[in-house]
Amino acid sequence: MFRIVGTLSLIFIFFGTIANAETVMVTGANRGIGLEFARQYADKGWTVIATHRREDIPESLASLKMQYASLIRIETMDVTNHSGIDALAKKLDGIPIDLIVHNAGISGGGSATQQFGRLDYSTFQDVMDVNVAGPLKISEAFLDHVAASDGKVIFTVTSSQGSIGSVNRPGLFYYRASKSAVNMVMRNLAQHPKITGNGILIGLIAPGATDTDFMAEVRGRMPLGDPKERVAGMIAQIESYPRDGSTLSFEWDGEEIPW
Ligand SMILES: NC(=O)c1ccc[n+]([C@@H]2O[C@H](COP(=O)([O-])OP(=O)(O)OC[C@H]3O[C@@H](n4cnc5c(N)ncnc54)[C@H](OP(=O)(O)O)[C@@H]3O)[C@@H](O)[C@H]2O)c1
């Protein structure tokens, strides 16, 4: 008898885990930090909606799907294409999303475009569209998906470069402004009744200098962290993030980033 009950409990736990599996949607999931978020959440048994902006399915996501099969759902989403964002939200209608990770981001280039004296202003708009408007628009479009979930969490990958109080030498005008702006947007959003009323957590998390294509220009000139370690750290911070509405910004290792 004990053996039967034990076996049944094991079956229940097994199916219970699957029934309660969580879903994360990651933007810019085809490479760098986004790809690592997708991999690590799939490894935890989460369903991952891995979004990218390419015409064809990127090789990186195709091979992730080979490895994790039905846990990976690949979808197209350019975070600057608002009608495309709405269309994906509609396509995924009825699917609860426990966690959104607003990861997609661009630096706007370094030496070529963000040098005072020869600033390329067309790039400024591009950086703000991707890094600031994108996360806000996606949060708006997918609010119902998050509200319908158990997790109810929206995180944005920010940067210490957006810390106004820490700036002590000039550079990266657009990128820094965009990360300060997205911090404000998210702290602002966290106070909204549609967020507080639905018990949704809005968080800000930063990877620190990490060895991805993003840092190609400075690779070899400064220490860069391993994306695996940084993403594992960020996931741990997401799990322990304060749910008091403070929307503070933390580094991957838990250090608070001053505004
Ligand atoms: N690496 C660092 O040291 C560092 C430090 C602090 C913060 N961050 C932040 O971490 C996040 C990820 O950076 P990363 O290092 O992984 O950069 P990355 O290797 O350059 O990857 C950026 C990702 O964003 C995607 N993306 C760019 N524009 C997009 C758009 N319009 N729509 C959808 N996806 C778009 C890219 O897609 P494509 O492949 O199609 O271009 C790519 O998947 C960014 O928000 C960045 O600001 C990075």
Image: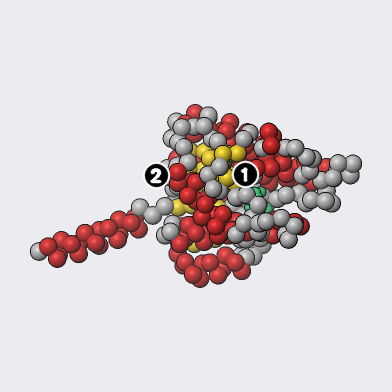
Q: Which circle marks residue 150 in the picture?
A: 2
Left or right of 129? Residue 143 is left
Instruction: Answer whether residue 117 is visible to the viewer in this image.
Output: yes
Residue in view at x 65 percent, y 52 percent: 209
Tag 1 and tag 2, C-beta contact below 8 Å: no
On the image, which quarter does residue 61 sit in?
A: bottom right
Q: Is mark 2 within 8 Å of ligand 1?
A: no
The image shows residue 116, relative to residue 245, as above or below, that is: below
- Secondary structure beneath dot 2 equals loop
Which kind of residue does numbered mark 1 sit on?
Thr
Residue in view at x 62 percent, y 44 percent: 158
On the image, which quarter does residue 183 sit in?
A: top right
Q: Position of residue 199 (x, y in %)?
A: 43, 35
The answer to which of 129 and 188 lies nearer the viewer is: 188
- Secondary structure beneath dot 1 equals loop
The answer to which of 22 and 212 lies nearer the viewer is: 212
Residue in view at x 64 percent, y 44 percent: 159
The image shows residue 181, relative to residue 71, as above or below, that is: above
Instruction: Answer whether residue 51 is visible to the viewer in this image.
Output: no
Q: Position of residue 122 (x, y in %)?
A: 81, 44
Which kind of residue does numbered mark 2 sit on?
Asp
Choose the circle earlier in sequence order: 1 or 2: 2
Q: Residue furthest right?
A: 117
Q: Position of residue 117 (x, y in %)?
A: 90, 41
Q: Position of residue 44 (x, y in %)?
A: 43, 59
Which residue matches tag 1?
158
On the image, which quarter does residue 45 sit in?
A: bottom left
Q: Quadrant of the N terminus?
A: bottom left
Q: Which circle marks residue 60 in the picture?
A: none
Rate crowding at label 1 as few (under 14), some (14 to 19) or many (20 or more) other CA atoms within 10 Å.
many
